[in-house]
Image (cartoon, rainbow, N blue to C red):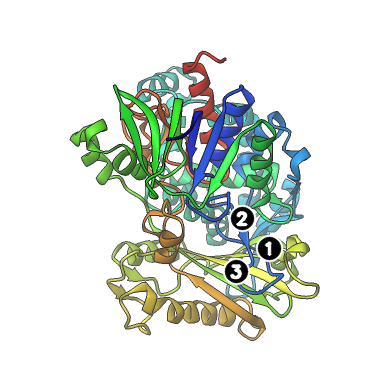
């Protein structure tokens, strides 16, 4: 057996590294293992198209992490971590050349909305202020272990207006948008961020999620990591090493070895076993931890069956683009300097149709595509005069059972992805960005299957380690009884996005899990 460590972290994504940093800070001897060739997980930046064109492979925006104390507590600025904030956070563009933009200043956003509805502009000002008033409470919720379902319900019941808050937290996107905004353009602008989390117009909780995303971005910005999202995990890795922690990439774990009811080692696929004396924490998806690493012999058949029915959400596809020059939008220059441009017709039914098609196994006719203007906000990511972009194609099926475009006969992703990317490029060129097709120097398409092949935790081509659903949130995430980061084996923990508060760049699951571990070890 190799050297023994106090703590082994499985997965060098940003949450696994965050957990490792706090354990090392407390004086533990820490080893981090990851199957990929570099640290970062869903937060890597690579030259996937052409040399000099640096694409964020998955995560782009630094949003809920703006509420995290981790960068300050760990002094990440000393390790090369730097954030920038675009002047325009995101824009929603329409086929007729119309646009609504979320600016830094809420009054500029109100004015942009007011082109379609003055009433909606005033409504947004009130909702944006609501976030400012609740920001400390939201940050505390994000950066701590979740209350139990009973405690959370009792707390709401005892608050003035608590039942109204309960209603809002469970309100569908369609219900909230129709209740609060009158213009379809405003509804699409406000509702689009629910789609980032694969939440449909009629899924429970979509309204609250869309408000939370949009108002946080309004207040704190749709910030980005200078030089690429990879610089966040690289900074975490540097901090970890400064505290004596070690990282091994290209090493895949096959099993957590349990003796006398306690994890004592991890086994790699090479057969090597590495000893651990105190704790194992996994930043992988919960299925890997529960089914693969622990297994029925350690957690029981009932938990295995519950994990197998876990809902992952809808798949994603990514199109990485190297461009001859920056893209021009039909709607004007504001879209091109936004971190994201959201293109769609002004109709909530557009979203409904996509989800219906996707969840029926169809390739959606006109999928919602987040256009990430990476080099427009961070020129270092492309050669001078050129541009790099990424299209995140939301809500596509993992298993193709049909095609709503009427163009694609293939029923496997390896055969269908290039033709589907052609369809998407043609649609965006025709409706929103007339020079797109002619500017492409090279494109690389990653289907949901490609994502899963590259990153094992991208189960079924998803990126959040589980769907954003009320019964897979808070203390119920990933499963009832496992919502406090602790697994059935007492010294094994979950520190990834499959734990509260869920997916995205927040550092919260990793930091929260570390606080629980240190408490259990009586180190804080």
Q: Secondary structure at mark 1?
A: helix
Mark 2, mark 3: which one is toward the viewer?
A: 3
Query: Quarter of the image holding residue 295?
Result: top left
Give whichever of discs 1 and 2 has the lower sequence position.
2
Q: Secondary structure at mark 3?
A: loop
Residue for badge 3 = 48
For this view, does 109 lie left or right of residue 276? right
Q: Is residue 128 visible?
A: no
Q: Secondary structure at mark 2?
A: loop
Residue for badge 2 = 60
Calculate the distance from the C-alpha at mark 3 to the C-alpha at mark 1: 14 Å
420 or 122: nearer the viewer: 420
Quadrant, the C terminus = top right
Quadrant, the N terminus = top left
Residue for badge 1 = 374
Numbered badge on residue 77: none
């Amino acid at each position: 057996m190799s050297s023994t460590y106090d703590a082994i972290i499985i997965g060098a994504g940003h949450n696994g590294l965050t957990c490792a940093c706090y354990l090392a800070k407390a004086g533990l001897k820490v080893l981090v293992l990851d199957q990929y060739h570099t640290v970062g997980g869903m937060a890597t930046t690579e030259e996937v198209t052409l040399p000099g064109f640096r694409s964020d492979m998955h995560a782009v925006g630094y949003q809920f992490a703006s509420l995290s104390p981790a960068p300050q507590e760990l002094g990440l600025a000393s390790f090369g971590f730097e954030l920038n904030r675009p002047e325009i956070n995101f824009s929603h563009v329409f086929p007729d050349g119309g646009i609504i933009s979320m600016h830094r200043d809420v009054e500029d956003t109100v004015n942009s909305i007011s082109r379609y509805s003055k009433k909606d502009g005033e409504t947004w000002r009130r909702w944006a202020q609501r976030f400012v008033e609740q920001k400390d409470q939201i940050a505390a919720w994000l950066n701590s272990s979740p209350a139990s379902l009973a405690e959370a319900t009792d707390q709401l019941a005892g608050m003035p207006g608590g039942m109204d808050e309960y209603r809002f937290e469970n309100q569908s996107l369609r219900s909230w948008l129709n209740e609060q905004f009158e213009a379809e353009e405003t509804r699409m602008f406000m509702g689009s961020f629910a789609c980032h989390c694969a939440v449909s117009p009629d899924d429970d909780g979509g309204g609250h999620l869309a408000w939370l995303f949009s108002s946080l971005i309004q207040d704190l910005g749709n910030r980005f990591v200078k030089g690429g999202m990879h610089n966040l995990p690289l900074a975490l890795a540097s901090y970890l090493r400064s505290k004596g922690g070690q990282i091994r990439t290209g090493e895949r774990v096959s099993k957590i070895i349990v003796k006398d009811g306690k994890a004592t080692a991890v086994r790699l696929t090479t057969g090597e076993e590495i000893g651990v004396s105190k704790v194992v924490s996994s930043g992988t998806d919960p299925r890997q931890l529960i089914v693969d690493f622990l297994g029925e012999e350690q957690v029981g058949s009932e938990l295995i069956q519950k994990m197998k029915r876990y809902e992952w959400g809808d798949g994603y596809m990514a199109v990485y683009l190297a461009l001859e020059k920056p893209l021009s939008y039909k709607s004007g220059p504001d879209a091109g300097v936004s971190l994201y441009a959201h293109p769609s017709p002004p109709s909530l039914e557009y979203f409904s149709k996509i989800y219906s098609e996707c969840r029926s196994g169809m390739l959606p006719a006109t999928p919602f595509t987040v256009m990430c203007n990476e080099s427009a906000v961070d020129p270092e990511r492309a050669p001078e005069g050129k541009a790099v972009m990424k299209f995140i194609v939301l809500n596509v099926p993992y298993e193709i059972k049909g095609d709503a475009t009427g163009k694609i006969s293939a029923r496997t992703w390896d055969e269908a992805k290039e033709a589907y990317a052609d369809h998407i490029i043609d649609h965006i060129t025709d409706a929103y960005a007339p020079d797109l097709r002619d500017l492409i120097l090279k494109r690389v398409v990653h289907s949901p299957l490609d994502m899963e092949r590259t990153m094992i935790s991208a189960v079924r081509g998803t990126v959040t380690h589980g769907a954003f659903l009320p019964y897979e949130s808070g203390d119920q995430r990933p499963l009832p009884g496992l919502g406090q980061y602790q697994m059935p084996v007492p010294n094994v923990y979950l520190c990834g996005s499959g734990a509260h508060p869920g997916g995205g760049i927040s550092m919260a699951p990793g930091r929260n899990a570390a606080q629980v571990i240190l408490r259990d070890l009586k180190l804080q």
